[in-house]
Amino acid sequence: MIGLYLILLFMIAASYIAVQIKDLLSSVVAVGAAGLALSVAFLILKAPDLAITQLAVEIVCLVILIKATVKRDTVSTKDMRGFITTIVSLIFIGTFLFFAYLALKELPKFGEPLMRVAQNYIQTGQAKTGASNLVSSVILDFRAYDTLGEATVLFTAVIGVLAVLRRIGRKKKDEVIKEND
Amino acid sequence: MVYFLCFIIFSIGLYCILVKRNLIKIIIGLIIIEYSVNLVFILFGYRFAGRAPILAAGQTIKNMVDPLPQALVLTAIVIGLATTALLIAIAMRIYDRYKTFDITEIRRLKG
């Protein structure tokens, strides 16, 4: 389990660097490092499907973020808000962490999950669905409507991206449109 | 203890959203929050000495980790990518109009 702690500390360090560094491109690279560390953490926690998905999604996300930041003003000199806003935010986060600590005592301990629903899936999943991978038997058979909703959200987001980014249809009459990126 | 490290990652992302003025930094904070939430779900389903939830042929010992949070998080990762792409598209459109990512300068409603 020491590997999991090391990966989590690495993720904390990478997130902190991504938040605090001035250069935007370095910030994007740091958040990419955090995502790849998350992929390794999934592998340690015995979730290989998630590790593969996180790896692919992370690379696509990194490409989109680099596309957004490169050729724009990458260094922002005045990065912080005012002093009072920062203090109020820190107090709010401290309160949140305190109540999170109180709530964490009520949860089942790490390494001993309850598995009331999932025990049924594990025992009878292969006989009912015929899939030897239980995760895919859950997402494609037991909870297939969730996956249908996910596909709906995904394609709605794609339509939204296309509607926001397109240039044809929003030009005025005598306007010349220059494609610059 | 492991859960608390996840909450620290969450609060780093929350700090980034609340305090920073750059739009890309705010999106990065959202991405960090998404990572921590996915990770805490997988940590809830972990079992000591558990196996990955993939059955071998004729396997009878079933000491597996919980497959249900893994399935839900698999859905959440893909949705996170879609929403991040939508946010970045809106941010790029804002940059084209205002020539800045600073949210305190994006005040005027133009056209």
Image (cartoon, coloured by chain):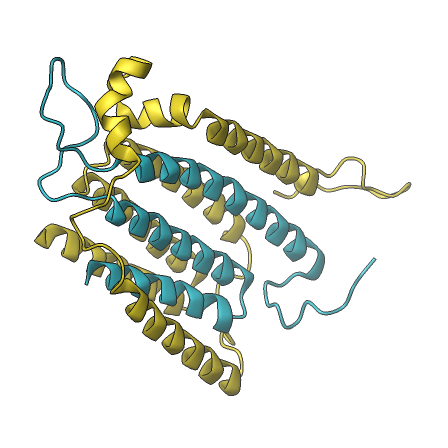
**Which chain does yellow denote in the image?**
A
Place of residue A97 in the rendered image (x, y in percent of width and height, measured from the top left): 34, 72
Q: Residue at x 29, y 69 (%)?
A: A101
Q: Compared with residue B93, is residue A143 higher up or lower down, i.e. above or below?
A: above
Q: Residue at x 81, y 41 (%)?
A: A170
Q: Residue at x 25, y 21 (%)?
A: A124
Q: Does any portion of residue A169 appear in the rendered image? A: yes
Tell me which corner region of the image, top left, top right, bottom left or bottom right, holds residue A19.
bottom left
Tell me which corner region of the image, top left, top right, bottom left or bottom right, holds residue B110.
bottom right
Place of residue A83 in the rendered image (x, y in percent of width and height, measured from the top left): 49, 86
Q: Residue at x 77, y 41 (%)?
A: A177
Quarter of the C terminus of chain B within the rendering:
bottom right
Of the pair B18 and A20, the residue shown nearer to us: B18
Q: Compared with residue B77, is residue A120 higher up or lower down, i.e. above or below?
A: above
Q: Does any portion of residue A13 appear in the rendered image? A: no
Of the pair B26 and A174, the residue shown nearer to us: B26
**Which chain does cyan denote in the image?**
B
In this rendering, would B87 be left or right of A42? Answer: right
Place of residue A62 in the rendered image (x, y in percent of width and height, measured from the top left): 41, 45
Tell me which corner region of the image, top left, top right, bottom left or bottom right, holds residue A28.
bottom left
